[in-house]
Image (cartoon, helix red, strand yellow):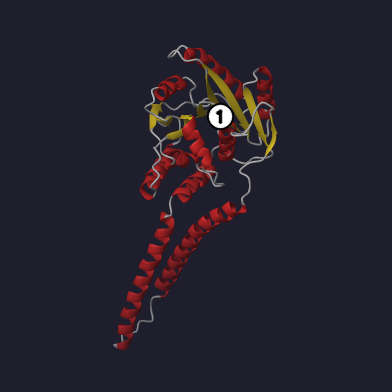
Amino acid sequence: MKKISIVVPCYNEEETVEAFYQACERVLPDLNRLNGETYEFEYIFVDDGSKDSTAAKIQVLNEVNPHCHYIIFARNFGKEAGLYAGLKHASGDFVTVMDADLQDPPEMLLEMVTYLESGEFDCVGTRRADRDGEPKIKSFLSDLFYTINNKISKTNIVNGARDFRLMTRQMTDAILDLSEYNRFSKGLFSWVGFRTKYLPYKNVERVAGETKWNFGSLFKYSIEGVVNFSDTPLKLATIAGFLFSFGAAIMIVIYAFRAIFGYVDSKGFTTIVCLILLLGGIQLIAIGVLGEYIGKIFLETKKRPIYIARLKDEGINERGN
């Protein structure tokens, strides 16, 4: 029998966790009729400091099915921490990451398992084929992020890629070897390499509840992705510094010659103010970019744990423990 670990980071998902569990259970019989293999599901629900009854709901699931494990964080550490904690405790031959809101269709596991069992791929990921139902501005900014990131980073991220993917044990262990504090999992999945196939699917609405991703959180997430996998912003700040310094040097020479030959112009107050504001703004942007990288270094050197668990069930252990 082969085990498939389903990692489910949760934050205020009291309305969806039971529906998610039932939807996955309905897929299991079809999976066992797929290719002669026998499979079992191991669920790892990670409650990321929810303010509703999500923790209680997943504890009830554990009582109903001992294969439903739970980890409850001491506070909200973020989805990336929840994802890492789930992978850390997953013991399956295959490991998948899914959202509890059923925007990741469990039925796709049938096709994903087939590809992995063929031995041709180490990972089967998913990407949205469309963005139906999503605000136009959000779709535009998402496409812009992928375009910019893939141009300035050596780590290519497929446009519309979801965290929902099925990985072999080998690839999962490779992800866990990257124990950095500042995590951007979409980039990490790509950075480790391995043979990956992406399956497109139509955008699916949440079954209940509200999305936790607003414009501010998505913008912050995109900054994480750029800073974690590219030093191009630092190089751009350096190039801008050289260009403006070169331009300033040329202007100094020009105005020096004008002064020598008596062409002294007392006008230009507006020009001076605009240049000061422009250069000051560029300097502040460059300092801000530098600060982002220094901040990442600062957090990494503290060696703080990625998460702290307040509770977890007795039947779950960290990988290797």
Picture quadrant where residue 263 is located:
bottom left
Residue 17 seen by the camera: yes
- Give how far across and how far down residue 196 sits, in percent: 39, 32
What residue occupies the far front of the structure in this picture? 320
Secondary element at tag 1: strand
Q: Is residue 285 left or right of residue 73?
A: left
Residue drawn at x 42%, y 68% as measured from the top left: 274
Quadrant showing the C terminus: top right
Judging depth in this view, the residue of 148 and 259 nearest the camera is: 148
- Specify the amino acid type for callout 1: Val
- Circle 1 packing at 10 Å, graded few (<14), some (14-19), many (20+), is many
What residue occupies the far left of the structure in this picture? 261
- Give how far across and how far down residue 207 sits, in percent: 54, 23
Return the residue at label 1.
Answer: 7
Q: In the rendered view, tell whether residue 53 sits above or below residue 183.
A: above
Residue drawn at x 31%, y 88% as measured from the top left: 260
Judging depth in this view, the residue of 63 and 179 nearest the camera is: 179
- Give how far across and how far down residue 90 sits, in percent: 57, 30
